[in-house]
Amino acid sequence: MARVCTAAVLRLRSARDLVNTDTAHPVSVRGGRKPLLGAFDRSTPTWISSWAWGLPAGHVTLSWRLAGAAVLFGLGAPTSASISLVRHDAVPAAMAGLTGGLLIFMLSARFHPLGSPVLRTAPLGSARVWLRLTRLPLQLSVGYFVLPATAALAAEPSAWAMPLASGFWLLALNGAYAVFAAYFMAAPFVAALSFLGAIAYTSYESLEYGRTVLIGFAALVLFLWHRAQRRYRHG
């Protein structure tokens, strides 16, 4: 009985801390330095992106995987930008920005907190929690996209519509993947595989039926969104 009461108290305390308001002061580390993600992960529910990544509140833990990803994407953006500027062609940089931005979003998005009973018992709607989990990966994705898109515009100003269209498709694909990831929650690999499979099938069918197949893809996204919301509310 004592163990059950203790577990209940800890759960209520976790829920209270998670739904803490934005007015709370960021937790500082030794030396008075504020958490690296403090400016991006403080909105209610607080520190949810850090929780999704398994990090201490607002602190980024360095690892070989993180360093390798930083080097890979750090080289990709300036390389594609240089190619576009040399060739005066907007295509390489625009496509690199779209592809790299989408990959960054897919690699950084984690939606397993949607399955937590702490969030389900807290006074938070599924859409708000989903948006909070999407916020930081989206900022990373768009931040990466800016450099190649700017280079594409500088390389071929007359083709300004290409980086603009790439930005639109980046936001649309990020939103669609966020729905897939929310539906599969604790299985990001399955979410990524299903999303890429749906994109590949839609692209294949569009060769024969044109852009009307996008309606089917949009319907699939709406269906998964509905199911993810029902799962959040009812388990």
Image (cartoon, rainbow, N blue to C red):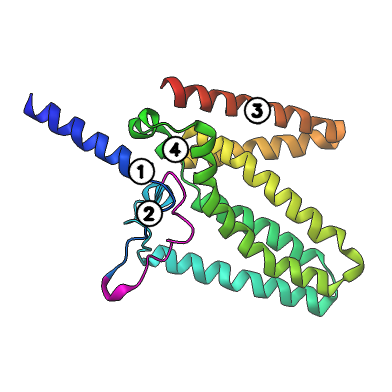
Residue 145, picture quadrant: bottom right
| Mark 1 lies on residue | 18
Residue 24, disc:
2
| Mark 3 lies on residue | 222
Image position of 153 with respect to 216: above or below: below
Residue 214 picture location, percent across and down: 77, 33
| Mark 4 lies on residue | 187
Instruction: Mark 1: give few (<14), some (14-19) or many (20+) Cα within 10 Å.
Output: some
Residue 32, picture quadrant: bottom left
Asked if one can make out residue 156 in the rendered structure from this viewpoint, the answer is yes
* Mark before the other along the chain sequence, 3 or 1: 1
Label 1, secondary structure: give it.
Answer: helix
The reply to whether dot 2 and dot 3 touch (C-beta < 8 Å) is no
Label 3, secondary structure: give it.
Answer: helix
Q: CA distance from mark 2 to mark 4?
A: 32 Å
Q: Is residue 210 left or right of residue 83?
A: right
User: What residue is shown at x 75% (from left), y 70% (from top)?
Assistant: 150
* Mark before the other along the chain sequence, 1 or 4: 1
Q: CA distance from mark 3 to mark 1?
A: 28 Å
Label 2, secondary structure: give it.
Answer: loop
